[in-house]
Amino acid sequence: MVNYDVIIIGGGAAGFFAAINIAEQNPKLKVAILERGKTGLQKVKVSGGGRCNVTHAEFMPNGLVKNYPRGEKELLGPFHQFMTGDTMDWFEKRGIQLKIEDDGRIFPVTDSSQTIIDCFIKETKKHKVEVFYNHSVNAIEYQNETWHLTTSEGDFTSEKLVIATGSNPKIWQLLENLGHTILQPVPSLFTFNIKDERIKDIPGVVVNHVFAKVLNKVSPFGDMSRRDREDDLVSEGPLLITHWGMSAPAILKLSAFGALELAKREYKFQIEINFIRQSFKDCLEQLKSIKQQLSKKTVFKSVQFDLPKRLWQQLVLASEIKEGKRWADLNRQQLESLTAQLTRAVFNVDGKSTFKEEFVTAGGVDLKEINFKTFESKLHPGLYFAGEVINVDAVTGGFNFQNAWTGAFIVAKSISEWNIRC
Ligand SMILES: Cc1cc2nc3c(=O)[nH]c(=O)nc-3n(C[C@H](O)[C@H](O)[C@H](O)COP(=O)(O)OP(=O)(O)OC[C@H]3O[C@@H](n4cnc5c(N)ncnc54)[C@H](O)[C@@H]3O)c2cc1C
């Protein structure tokens, strides 16, 4: 039996960040990480396409929380304690230079996740955090104010226990046995599989800014009204046509905010894309005026609304307008059909694919059972959570790591202020 003041289960982003900060803030505490893998930080390694998108350039807590389909309300207070700017400071103070990209994502200037891993390994050594690899935790018990852990390599005890095991079903089961409620895990951040003539031959096409929405079964058509825009399953942003369907933030946001609903629908549903972010009426008026101005030109060749040429041509053909047709010869029906393709194009989604740069799981420990001032369990004193193990997840862009850093930092602050008995 090996005893530590603090044990962290899980050597991922949240686990390392918690351990380093605890040991740094209170060097008297004996801190250990138990990690089931033969190395830790595996998700950090592959994150952001190998570049590790550590956080996002959103510096207001009120704005930041909007990126969390689950956790928006609960993370507001924690973000006032440890924000994206604090994350940047933390890494920069440890010699890691960061850069902000045009879309707000923040990466190490090296463009390598190994930079972050090296920093964590160096800091654990510096602050004498012990890391036990190949130690899978199989049982957790609380007796005599002490946590007893059974691992594949022997038993451990500690007074404070931090669970940072990400989306691990075994640990969720053990937490259920301790009385915690676990919300059903479902995937979040995925791309949509779509087989459709309009996009079949144009993979790689990007539209910089679209409106997208998941149609509900009751009212499948209509303009993007204010009411719709307030609905959870509406998004906007860049859209990428892929070999399998559609991706990029406009789609990934729908997959995150709709994670539970889309799982219920078994990933079979319809989406509507407004490629030009105009109402049907405004677009129709504009097309009528283009018809006057470009009367002798062919519709197929005169790309409008700054759309990528190949997409424009597909939408023209889908509107039953032949390649050689001139603007002057368009009838009302064709104008309306083109308007519909541009502003309310409906696509059938049949399944999902993994977004390779980032994915997470919605679900986990019920947020009602966590005290967000400390990230301590409301059910068991001395039990803390950080990272993806709780029912928090975010859209793509560095927000998932920010949840891990913020939770882990607050756990560390709370534990390091504890007056150790001996
Ligand atoms: C491909 C990919 C790319 C991503 N890219 C980004 C990105 O660029 N930016 C971003 O913000 N987010 C990204 N994410 C999401 C981000 O990686 C996670 O939100 C984050 O890693 C969660 O950290 P965590 O410490 O909670 O969990 P994890 O990183 O999953 O770590 C949990 C650790 O616990 C260990 N563990 C589990 N069970 C046990 C057990 N029983 N005993 C001992 N150890 C155990 C696991 O082996 C693991 O090492 C990405 C995710 C993926 C999959």
Image (cartoon, rainbow, N blue to C red):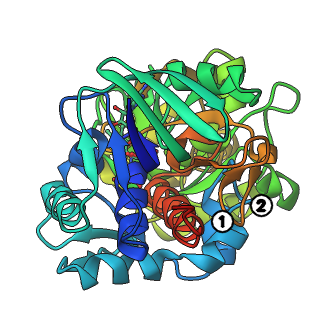
Residue 42 higher or lower than 263, as above or below: below
Q: Quadrant of residue 40?
A: top left
Q: Quadrant of residue 398?
A: bottom left
Give residue 183's position: percent from left, percent from top.
Answer: 71, 29
Residue at which label 2 appears: 73
In the image: residue 18, left or right of residue 369: left
Residue at which label 1 appears: 65
The answer to which of 1 and 340 lies nearer the viewer is 1
In the image: residue 305, left or right of residue 64: left
Specify the amino acid type for callout 2.
Lys
Residue at x-position 35% and y-position 78%: 90
Asked if one can make out residue 304 in the rendered structure from this viewpoint, the answer is yes
In the image: residue 244, left or right of residue 82: left
The quarter of the image holding the N terminus is: top left
Query: Residues at badges 1 and 2 in contact (C-beta under 8 Å)?
Result: yes
Mark 2 surroundings within 10 Å by alpha-carbon count, few (fewer than 14), some (14 through 19), many (20 or more): few
Q: Does dot 2 land on a helix, a strand or a loop?
A: loop
The answer to which of 361 and 215 lies nearer the viewer is 361
Mark 1 surroundings within 10 Å by alpha-carbon count, few (fewer than 14), some (14 through 19), many (20 or more): many
Residue at x-position 82% and y-position 24%: 217
Q: Quadrant of residue 281?
A: bottom right
Give residue 249's position: percent from left, percent from top.
Answer: 47, 52
Residue 302 higher or lower than 91, as above or below: above
The mark nearer the N terminus, 1 or 2, is 1
Residue at x-position 35% and y-position 73%: 24
Asked if one can make out residue 298 in the rendered structure from this viewpoint, the answer is no
Residue 129 higher or lower than 289, as above or below: above
The answer to which of 210 and 263 lies nearer the viewer is 263
Give residue 13's position: percent from left, percent from top.
Answer: 36, 51
**Which quadrant of the frame does ligand 1 lie within?**
top left
